[in-house]
Image (spheres, grey):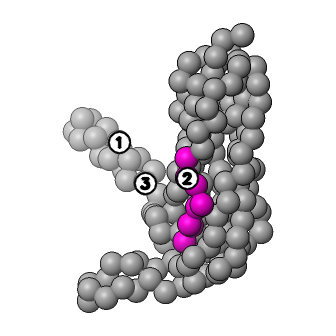
Amino acid sequence: MRKFTCTFAILLLIASSCKQADNNPVKPPDAISTEVVTNPASASGTNSKKGVPEFKFEQETWDFGQITEGEKISFAYQFTNVGNAELVIRAANGSCGCTVPEFPKDPIPAGGKGIINVTFDSNGKTGMQHKTVTLISNTIPNTKVINVTGEVLPK
């Protein structure tokens, strides 16, 4: 009987400690609206891609050639929003601390142009280098990768 009472008490504690799932998840205050994003592949087979922005870069890979260790160099990646909605870049992340991107904070209108400035710091680097910058935006897909490549010669 004592075993039954202990087992029942443990089961009661476990059952009462479970929290019901919240059907109204909290949306972060800085979340990007998904109103302009639609699924380009629909069940009907038609393209439902209306109101979607799209990057078109003049150059997606920057080959800086050869530089000497310790040099800092920059490049401006120019792009056009060839979609039919405002393009909002949420973040730009370099693959390491040596690659620092700067991106426009304001929305780029359909047909508008923008620039992503990327600075590469070769301090402590030698040999062939390949770095990336990942852009997170309201496009489909929501990430775009641009590349930095070249050779760093020792001092």
**Local crowd size for mark 1, using a 10 Å CA cut-off: few (<14), some (14–19), many (≥20):** few
Q: Are there few (<14), some (14-19), or many (20+) residues within 10 Å of tag 3?
A: few
**Residue holding disc 1:** 10
Residue 71 seen anywhere in this rendered image of the structure: yes
| Residue 64 in picture, x, y percent from top left | 64, 36
- In what element is the residue under mark 2? loop
**Residue 27 lies in quadrant:** bottom right
Q: Nearer the viewer, mark 3 or mark 1?
A: 3
State how far apart marks 3 and 2 are (Cα).
Answer: 50 Å
- Specify few, some or many for label 2: CA neighbours under 10 Å numbering under 14, 14-19, or 20 or more: some
Side of 107 where 80 appears, left or right: left
Q: On screen, 123 above or below 18?
A: above
Q: Disc 3 residue type?
A: Cys
> Which residue is found at the position 57% from the left and 76% from the top?
82
Specify start and end residues of the magenta stretch as a single range.
54-61
> Which residue is label 2 attached to?
60
Q: Quadrant of the N terminus?
A: top left
> Would residue 59 be counted in the magenta stretch?
yes
Q: Amino acid at mark 1?
A: Ile
Residue wearing tag 3:
18
Is residue 133 found left or right of 140 in the rendered image? right
Residue pictured at 32% horizontal, 83% vertical: 42
Which residue type does callout 2 highlight?
Answer: Glu
